[in-house]
Image: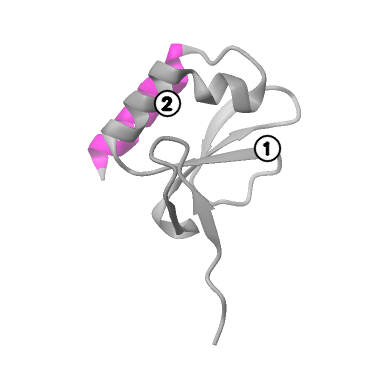
Amino acid sequence: MKKIPQRTCMGCNTKKDKKELIRIVKKQDGKIQLDKTGKIAGRGAYICDNVQCLEKVIKSKRLDKIFQCKIEDEVYQNLRGVMIDR
């Protein structure tokens, strides 16, 4: 039986299957983007498909700390759009 990769959500700190979470990537050129394939090279962080988790991440500035840079509001707006679409 194949092992399913587990990742931790930045918002609620619960472990879930990698496929259930949304991946955010900081590419080598410093750009932050959503990774729908899970294969873009760069530093990745995961979040539940849940607006409450996103609000916790925004309030605590956890994404800023993980990627060690200022995260633009545009990235958070994209995340909100993805969560509403699902």
The colour scheme of the drawn protein is one colour
Which residues fall within the magenta stretch? 73-85
Q: What is the residue that sits farthest to the bottom in this orientation?
A: 1
Question: With 3 as the anchor, is 73 left or right in this view?
Answer: left
- The residue beneath circle 1 is 43
Residue at x 61% of width, y 40% of height: 44
Instruction: Tell me where residue 35 appears, x and y as whole percent.
Output: 53, 42
Q: Main secondary structure of the magenta part?
A: helix
Instruction: Name the residue: 53% across, 25% down.
Output: 63
Q: Which residue lies most toward the front here?
A: 13
Q: Quadrant of the C terminus?
A: top left
Would you call the spot at circle 1 few (<14 residues within 10 Å), some (14-19), or many (20 or more)?
A: some
Q: Nearer the viewer, mark 2 or mark 1?
A: 2
- Residue 18 point in image, percent of width and height: 49, 57
**78 drawn magenta:** yes
Disc 2 designates what residue? 57
Q: Amino acid at mark 1?
A: Arg
User: Is the residue 84 above or below the residue 69 in the image?
Assistant: below
- Where disc 1 sits, the SS reads strand
- In this rendering, would 32 be left or right of 86? right
User: Measuring 62% from the left and 28% from the top, which residue is drawn there?
Assistant: 66
Q: Which amino acid does the dot numbered 2 rest on?
A: Val
Q: Quadrant of the N terminus?
A: bottom right
Crowdedness of circle 2 by 10 Å Cα count: few (<14), some, many (20+)? some
